[in-house]
Image (cartoon, grey):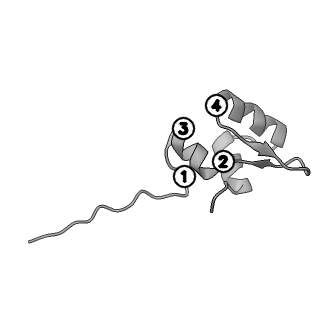
Amino acid sequence: MLVLSERELADFTGASRADAQARELRHMGIPFRQRRNGKLVVLRADVTMHHGPTPNQRPASPALRLP
């Protein structure tokens, strides 16, 4: 998915309200947009670029080859 889900955004910012989430995202320097309904849209790539993978993204498992 290209954008964080509402749950991921709440987990990442530690806030459930859009105004508090926006404040936290500004503090972290992460760009976001606000929809007409007030909900925030945050691109996953922006979060990954600033802070690494989100909690729901597992790093790729290393390929292990035994002789």
C-alpha gap between disc 2 and disc 4: 17 Å
C-alpha gap between disc 1 and disc 3: 14 Å
Mark closest to the chain's N terminus, 1 or 3:
3
Q: Nearer the viewer, mark 1 or mark 4?
A: 4
In what element is the residue under mark 4? loop
Total numbered labels: 4
Displayed quadrant of residue 6: bottom right
Residue at the image point whose x is 50% and y is 49% from the top: 53
Residue at the image point whose x is 26% and y is 65% from the top: 63
Mark closest to the chain's N terminus, 4 or 3:
4
- Nearer to the camera, 52 or 31: 31
Mark closest to the chain's N terminus, 1 or 4:
4
For disc 1, the marked residue is 55
Mark closest to the chain's N terminus, 2 or 4:
2
Indicate the amino acid at tag 1: Pro
Q: Nearer the viewer, mark 2 or mark 4?
A: 4
Image marks 2 and 4: residues in contact by CB distance under 8 Å: no
Image marks 4 and 3: residues in contact by CB distance under 8 Å: yes
Image marks 2 and 1: residues in contact by CB distance under 8 Å: yes
Give residue 5's position: percent from left, percent from top. Answer: 70, 57
In what element is the residue under mark 1? loop
The C terminus, quarter of image: bottom left
Indicate the amino acid at tag 3: His
Q: Which mark is residue 50?
A: 3
Q: Which mark is residue 11?
A: 2
For disc 4, the marked residue is 29
Give residue 18's position: percent from left, percent from top. Answer: 82, 42
